[in-house]
Image (cartoon, rainbow, N blue to C red):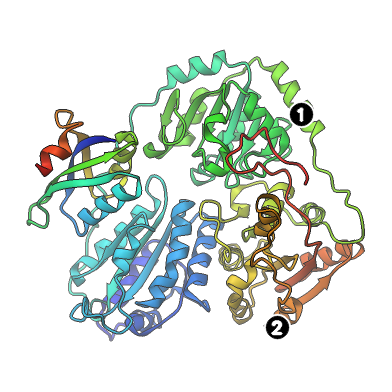
């Protein structure tokens, strides 16, 4: 299993968190943790998502990017391979 | 609108539908959508009352696919909304633009387990491209416009808008001058054209692999021109059928699990796959790591997420097919390969000789294909008849072959045909169904009766769930489990009870005359064709097997 930390910039819209979590699970990624503040009244939300999977992370990035409210997704390379452990520690 | 009444959320819905050119909607009323149905009363939009919400959803899908427009369906909260889900999932799998409107209990009752309350907004996440729940009447107009924009933008798909009853009833006090357009459209990288040209010019044995995206992109002329200019042998997915004209000498038909032998053998031998609006579906590839093992891939698509999803692309060309495909058009020196492929096509053509007097479904479908008027729209259900239809009916446009590809939904064919016929009243529409599938949405015969929709139904009856029976015979040691339908109703009598003219045939000698009668009949017609229950669909690539190891008989 490979661990990744994704940084997701999104419009702060209804159920955007649920949408991201649903896509992440469905596309075969285990959700190990997240940091998110949404529905804050700001226009933009930033979500940090810690995931692990045997699958290439690009597959998940492309699928999250397709969600209508998403502005951008990137992998935090510094956190890659130990992001989940850091988060849960 | 009746000008004496204030505009409500329900009335606003129909105003926005009209702004988007919607003339027809499919639906079923109920408690939580009554204000919308009240507003319908004053609207110019024509509503078709289906007899089940799933029928409404599939009619909207058929309407959208046949006409290239957005299909619209409506249902009430709770079970009405959940009954739409299969149709929305089908539309998502096949990238069909549909807008579904659901009524919801009033906002004050939401979350209280109210009567007919379900979290359809939550349920929609996995089966729509996007969804909305409107909590403020001032948001409704913008949301409805965005629903249409999202349904059509990029890779098309279904959008659900859930509207609580109090929002439907609320008075609209302000209108938009302009709605907010999408701002987060996926940025497509620059197309890898020079790399693709390099790969193409070095190919000795290329194949053009055409999918449903061609029709969705309205790029049929471009793909045909590309096929013509390059002279490249071509194959089609189930959803791509009709994109390449069947009389193109280099076209080999469908590939994949029930594809033609020539298609599958040629793809396995090719050194380049030019993939156009297709996604390497598992029913196409068979065992993925043995699919076209020596081929490089040039992949054209509108959806970034399809690139490298199941097969690495040596060159990816993202964006509008209409604009991108001509960039690679060139003459290729592949005459040896063309000759080889043509020989394969000649060697492995279809055979329609079949012993005995019992009716052979492939021969019926071939004869119907030869008889049907130009621009006939075929819909199918799912199972053996679907694959036989894909193999033996020739269509000249993907919008003339509507079948549930990705989801493989039994019950699709009849309501989809209703939608198709309403969108194209002057064309012949034929639903090819099976005795298992038709019972999945048989209540829609009542919709045909109510509106006198002249859909023709060709019902292929083997008194079995034929495809499952075939697999049980081949792969489960003949242990036939729950696939016998010997207690089917008398289908002709059933059709007549809905005032639909019907005939049952059982012998080969009856086929020609019966087909002519069905096609020439002015109103709805059901032709019930009893076939041998033991007939199988061939060729068949067994599961987890390379496509060149297809079975051709028991």
Please report the residue visible at 20 percent of the width from the left and 72 percent of the height from the top: B137
Side of B348 where B54 appears, left or right: left
Nearer the viewer's eye, disc 1 or disc 2?
Answer: 1
The numbered mark at residue B344 is 1
Question: Where in the figure is residue B351, as x and y percent of width and height?
Answer: 84, 44
Which quarter of the rendered picture does the C terminus of chain A lie within?
Answer: top left
Identified at 67% across, 71% down, the residue is: B454
Q: Is mark 2 on a helix, strand or loop?
A: loop
Q: Are marks 1 and 2 in contact (CB under 8 Å)?
A: no
Residue topped by disc 2: B499
SS label for mark 1? helix
Chain letter of mark 1 equals B
Q: How far apart are marks 1 and 2 (CA)?
A: 48 Å
B164, B473: nearer the viewer: B473
Position of B279 with respect to B75 (left or right) is: right
Q: Does residue B443 appear in this view?
A: yes
Give how far across and how far down residue B396 sits, in percent. 67, 46
């Amino acid at each position: 299993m490979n661990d990744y930390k994704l940084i997701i910039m999104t419009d702060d819209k209804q159920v955007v968190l649920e949408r991201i979590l649903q896509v992440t699970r469905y596309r075969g990624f285990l959700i190990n943790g997240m940091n998110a503040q949404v529905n804050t009244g700001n226009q933009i939300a930033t979500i940090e998502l810690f995931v692990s999977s045997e699958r290439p992370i690009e597959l998940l990035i492309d699928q999250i990017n397709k969600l209508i409210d998403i502005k951008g997704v990137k992998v935090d390379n510094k956190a890659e391979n130990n992001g989940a452990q850091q988060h849960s520690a | 609108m009746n000008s004496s009444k204030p505009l409500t959320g329900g009335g606003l819905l129909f105003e926005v539908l009209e702004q988007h050119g919607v003339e027809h909607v499919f639906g079923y009323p109920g408690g939580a959508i009554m204000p919308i149905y009240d507003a319908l009363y004053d609207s110019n939009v024509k509503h078709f009352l289906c007899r089940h919400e799933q029928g409404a959803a599939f009619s909207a899908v058929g309407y959208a696919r046949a006409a290239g427009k957005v299909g619209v369906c409506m249902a009430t909260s709770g079970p009405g909304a959940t009954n739409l889900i299969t149709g929305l999932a089908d539309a998502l799998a096949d990238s069909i633009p549909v807008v579904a409107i659901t009524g919801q209990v009033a906002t004050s009752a939401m979350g209280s387990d109210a009567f007919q309350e379900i979290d359809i907004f939550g349920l929609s996440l996995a089966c729509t491209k996007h969804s909305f729940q409107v909590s403020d009447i001032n948001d409704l107009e913008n949301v409805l416009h965005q629903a249409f924009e999202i349904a059509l933008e990029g890779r098309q798909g279904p959008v659900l808008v859930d509207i609580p009853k109090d929002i439907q009833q609320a008075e609209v006090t302000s209108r938009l001058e302009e709605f907010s357009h999408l701002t987060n459209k996926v940025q497509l990288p620059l197309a890898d054209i020079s790399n693709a040209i390099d790969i193409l010019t070095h190919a000795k044995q290329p194949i053009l692999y055409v999918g449903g995206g061609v029709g969705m992109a309205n790029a049929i002329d471009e793909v045909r021109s590309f096929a013509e200019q390059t002279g490249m042998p071509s194959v089609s997915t189930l959803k791509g059928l009709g994109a390449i004209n069947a009389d193109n000498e280099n076209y080999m038909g469908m590939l994949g699990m029930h594809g033609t032998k020539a298609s599958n053998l040629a793809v396995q031998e090719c050194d380049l796959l030019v993939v156009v609006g297709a996604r390497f579906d598992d029913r196409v590839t068979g065992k993925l790591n043995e699919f076209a093992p020596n081929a490089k891939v040039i992949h054209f698509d509108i959806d970034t997420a399809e690139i490298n999803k199941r097969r690495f692309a040596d060159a990816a060309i993202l964006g509008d097919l209409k604009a991108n495909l001509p960039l690679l058009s060139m003459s290729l020196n592949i005459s040896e390969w063309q000759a080889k492929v043509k020989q394969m096509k000649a060697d492995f053509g279809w055979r329609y000789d079949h012993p005995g007097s019992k009716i052979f479904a492939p021969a019926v479908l071939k004869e119907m294909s030869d008889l049907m008027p130009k621009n006939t729209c075929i819909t199918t259900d799912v199972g053996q008849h679907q694959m036989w239809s894909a193999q033996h009916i020739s269509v000249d446009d993907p919008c003339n072959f509507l079948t549930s590809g990705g989801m493989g939904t039994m019950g699709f064919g009849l309501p989809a045909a209703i939608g198709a016929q309403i969108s194209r009243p002057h064309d012949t529409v034929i639903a090819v169904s099976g005795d298992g599938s038709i019972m999945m949405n048989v209540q829609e015969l009542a919709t045909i009766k109510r509106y006198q929709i002249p859909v023709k139904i060709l019902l292929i009856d083997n008194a079995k769930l034929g495809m499952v029976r075939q697999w049980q015979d081949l792969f489960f040691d003949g242990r036939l489990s729950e696939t016998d339908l010997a207690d089917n109703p008398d289908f002709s009598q059933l059709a007549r009870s809905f005032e639909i003219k019907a005939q049952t045939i059982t012998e080969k000698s009856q086929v020609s005359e019966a087909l002519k009668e069905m096609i020439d009949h002015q109103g709805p017609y059901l032709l019930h064709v009893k076939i041998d229950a033991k007939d199988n669909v061939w060729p068949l690539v067994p599961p987890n097997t390379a496509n060149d190891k297809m079975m051709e008989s028991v």
